Amino acid sequence: MKTKHISSLSGFLGTVIVPVYETNSQSITFEGITVTAKIFSGKKDSFYISEQNENLFLFVGIGKQIDYKSLKTIFRRVSNNQKEILDKNIALFIPNEIEGNNVEAIISGMVLGTYDLGHFKNIITHPFLNPNFELQILSKQEYSSVINKAIKIASAQLETLVLVDLPPNKVTPKYLAEWAQNKGAKFGFDVKVLGREESEKEGLGAFLAVGKGSENEPQFVIMSYEPKGSSSDLKHIGLVGKGITFDTGGLNIKTAGMLHMKCDMAGGAAVFGTMQLIADLELPIKVTAIVPCAENSVDAKSFLPSDVITSYSGKTIEIIDTDAEGRLVLADGLSYLIQNYNPEYIVDVATLTGSAVGTFGYECAALFTNNTEVSKKIQASGDAVGERLWPLPLWDAYKPDIESEIADVKNYSGKPVAGAISAAKFLEFFTNEHPAWVHLDIAGVAFGDDEFAKSKHATAYGVHLLTKFIENL
């Protein structure tokens, strides 16, 4: 999306979008238009359309108090639902009271409103996606840097939405590896991909076990970003994302909910989107990200319950349940990251357990970490952009849940309780006691229902959260 700053509406013909705070006044006046409070008072999520001098004025109520997430949703709604009046010249008025951070939310929301789930339909392209479209910004201040960042944030989130929503016969491990290579070349980060043979040579046994039953070759994707001309004292963060492109449950096959298991790579997609955004923003930080991509399918070659496999760390794992596969690929991802790159901070992201959904519903992700300071920082980052987190314990009282008699550890407790915690304890086992490790279980927030589609779909949760956290380190 192109934008242009204007200081007045002199000579403008088209649609003007006007955010309005809720007011107790008798009326609202803008550019000679007066609207009585009985008709429109700026109440949150309300809108009013007026026509004057061949211009349409779309008044958008933003309420008395605004926050980042609400603004983003409101203007995504405007962009998505009002396409018929957004097909000409568009001007967006920015009131003086709205600060830069909230301008970012408004612009990002408008760009996100261009998203359409009909990837395999003949649909009318959103007017904002026309190469010649230019959004005119009517404001006293100049917001070009804020707007540029907002567009980059939304663009990375749009990419993530597409990756998660496309079907599994399209988004295979190979597709994700090629996506990373293409985006790395475009935005400026290095990509290395280990296929089956290379992964066998590296000893990525837990990762390979999960993909054994699929005809789609697993791909262990390693991405590295470092800003141009960077110094040696840059902070170094490591990211690991679960990239299970489809999860049947393996031989412990799922009995419900399999339709939506194309979303089981949403953690990996969040890491991919974050890498695009970090590189696009040219953040002054070193990032190494790993997304182990595999399909957990059913075949004569599938790994078996009661198998004992050897992970990259050299630790053995007893397989109790083949549907607890995400933690296996993350275990090898974490071990590989720590042993070969040893970043100062590590965050892994995964749609890992139904237990996290049972605990928090669809309101926030489950947060696990051994570092109180990092916990506060990542929670604050999430609150700032409306991607909330809440901590759960990593007490050693839960350690027996993953103890095995035949191997070093088992991949599932076998108990119908504390599933998110025992999964986190399993991952912790492979962190080599790293002092600043964070695990985010995003099962309840990465894929779900909202007003923007009739069926469940992706949210792009994690992209902005991770980037904000990295900016705040």
Image (cartoon, grey):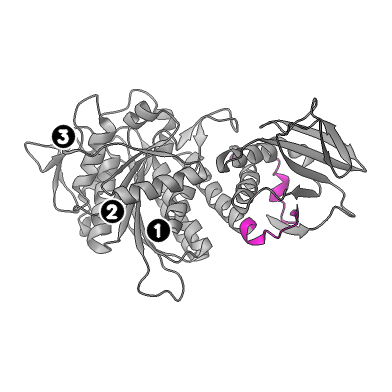
How would you classify the magenta stretch by its main secondary structure? loop
Q: Which mark is residue 436?
A: 2
Q: Nearer the viewer, residue 469 or 198?
A: 469
Q: Earlier in the sequence, mark 3 or mark 2?
A: 3
Q: Which amino acid type is marked by label 3?
A: Ala
Residue furthest front in the image: 25
- Measured in 3D between alpha carbons, the distance from the residue under mark 1 to the one under mark 2, in whole angstroms, is 12 Å
Q: Which amino acid type is marked by label 2?
A: Ala
Q: Earlier in the sequence, mark 1 or mark 2?
A: 2
Q: Say which residue label 3 marks.
A: 397
Question: Is 255 above or below relative to 243?
Answer: above
- Measured in 3D between alpha carbons, the distance from the residue under mark 1 to the one under mark 3, in whole angstroms, is 31 Å
Q: Say which residue label 1 marks.
A: 473
Q: Give the image location of residue 373, x and y in percent.
A: 32, 51
The quadrant in which residue 445 appears is: top left
Q: Quadrant of the C terminus?
A: bottom left
- Which region of the structure is painted magenta? 118-147
Q: Nearer the viewer, residue 352 or 126?
A: 352
Residue occupying the point 73% across, 46% down: 127
- Taking the magenta stretch, the answer to whether it contains residue 122 is yes
